[in-house]
């Protein structure tokens, strides 16, 4: 929601473009850390307490953002805001698993996915509209109000969904032990790298696009959300196509096609980043349209291969997505030269690293299949 305001905020806070992009990197970092901690803790302490605590922190940090007078203050407050909001992401899925039957759960999770796709379309549009009437502080005040309303609804409507007998102290240690096992698993980490770096490419765009579109190409702030929304429309179209392609291709094969295509679009961005706005927008939409399909297919493959560690694998994968997003945002800030070059370069590098991760997982999987076949022949 605050993306259209980044250039104006930078002027008021007397901060450079790179310094303002640190506020995005700080958010992704706080989000990543929060999700890693909230998951295991909720298995012991319950969902409702952690959800309310996280939302309270989000509200306080959002309100304090309106009082920031230096960019360093805003960076810290954005990290705290993200740490609190991570509770909502983790708890929503955990509560869904607690409440709904296995037959109902896919529909509920699909609805959550739809919301998370619609939100990035509406948020920049709403932010741009607010900027036509109010200063940028109004965006963070609105976030605080929304957080308050959500917190009150949780307090009044949502009971504790975790059964008392499930609150076992050992769950936390087991979860972190599973993290260690997954980190040492080359195939699992290859799959996670595929989805994490693809997501990182998206966050490189999120970090750089306000300055590229508004400052470099002189797009009015209120129209930024429309250009941003083109990416969401592309994501929805590719996800619908992905369902059909899964009937034809295996997950590893489809991932190879999608990650290869993303590398191609990333390289084209790097070549044509200084061309006109239309060419840049088209290439960005093609690149971004693949992000959710790659993420969905990678996570599905990971959970198929690591079903016994599904919870820890999901938490690690999602947190690393945002961790890589934080690094990508920081990289755009470090390389910023007031042109689209930094954004295009980081997007292309992320796509290439995601492709390498996909190839690593496939090679590892093939070697395991061959080893199993040799053992059967010996027997």
Image (cartoon, rainbow, N blue to C red):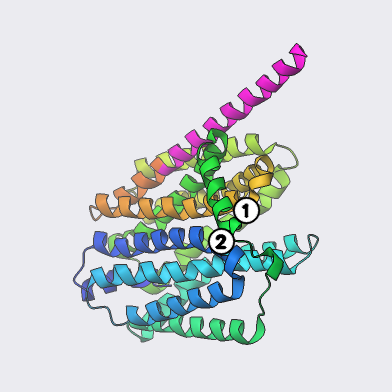
Q: Is mark 1 on a helix, strand or loop?
A: helix
Tell me whether the residue at label 1 lies in contact with that at label 2, contact meaning CB atoms closer than 8 angstroms: yes
The picture quadrant where one finds residue 108 is bottom right
Name which residue lies at 59% across and 48% down.
313
- Vertical arrangement, residue 137 with respect to residue 29, above or below: below
- Whether residue 278 is visible: no
The image shows residue 83 at horizontal and vertical percentages of: 43, 67
Where residue 250 appears, x then y in whole percent? 70, 36
Residue 260 location (% of width, % of height)? 52, 36
| Residue corresponding to mark 1 | 311
At a point 32% along the width and 83% down the height, the residue shown is 135
Residue corresponding to mark 2 = 39
Report crowding for label 1: few under 14, some 14 to 19, many 20 or more residues within 10 A (C-alpha): some
Q: Is mark 2 on a helix, strand or loop?
A: helix
Quadrant of res 157: bottom right
Q: Is residue 25 magenta?
A: no
Residue occupying the point 36% across, 69% down: 78
Stretch in magenta: 350-379
Residue reaching furthest to the top: 378
Q: Earlier in the sequence, mark 1 or mark 2?
A: 2
Question: Is residue 354 inside the magenta stretch?
Answer: yes
């Amino acid at each position: 929601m605050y993306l259209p305001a980044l250039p104006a905020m930078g002027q008021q806070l007397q901060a450079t473009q790179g310094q303002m992009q640190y506020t995005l990197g700080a958010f992704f970092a706080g989000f990543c850390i929060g999700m890693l901690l909230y998951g295991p803790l909720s298995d012991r302490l319950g969902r409702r307490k952690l959800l309310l605590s996280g939302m309270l922190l989000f509200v306080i940090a959002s309100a304090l953002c309106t009082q920031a007078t230096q960019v360093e203050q805003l960076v810290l407050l954005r990290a705290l805001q993200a740490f609190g909001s991570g509770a909502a992401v983790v708890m929503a899925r955990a509560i869904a698993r607690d409440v709904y039957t296995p037959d109902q759960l896919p529909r509920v999770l699909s609805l959550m996915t739809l919301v998370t796709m619609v939100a990035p379309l509406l948020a920049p549009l709403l932010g741009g509209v607010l900027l036509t009437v109010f200063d940028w502080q109004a965006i963070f005040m609105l976030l605080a109000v929304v957080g308050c309303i959500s917190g009150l609804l949780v307090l009044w409507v949502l009971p504790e969904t975790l059964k008392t007998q499930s609150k076992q102290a050992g769950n936390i240690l087991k979860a972190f032990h599973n993290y260690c096992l997954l980190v040492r698993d080359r195939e699992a980490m290859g799959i996670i790298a595929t989805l994490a770096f693809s997501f990182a490419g998206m966050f490189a765009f999120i970090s750089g696009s306000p300055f590229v579109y508004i400052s470099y190409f002189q797009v009015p702030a209120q129209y930024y959300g429309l250009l941003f929304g083109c990416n969401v429309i592309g994501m929805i179209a590719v996800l619908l196509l992905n369902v059909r392609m899964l009937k034809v291709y295996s997950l590893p094969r489809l991932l190879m096609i999608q990650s290869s295509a993303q590398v191609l679009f990333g390289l084209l961005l790097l070549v044509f980043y200084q061309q006109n706005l239309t060419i840049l927008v088209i290439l960005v939409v093609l690149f971004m349209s693949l992000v959710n399909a790659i993420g969905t297919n990678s996570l599905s493959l990971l959970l198929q291969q690591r079903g016994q560690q599904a919870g820890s694998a999901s938490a690690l994968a999602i947190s690393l997505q945002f961790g890589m997003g934080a690094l990508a945002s920081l990289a755009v800030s470090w390389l910023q030269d007031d042109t689209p070059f930094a954004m295009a370069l980081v997007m292309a590098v992320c796509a290439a690293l995601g492709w390498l991760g996909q190839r690593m997982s496939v090679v590892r999987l093939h070697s395991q299949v061959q080893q199993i076949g040799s053992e059967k022949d010996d027997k």
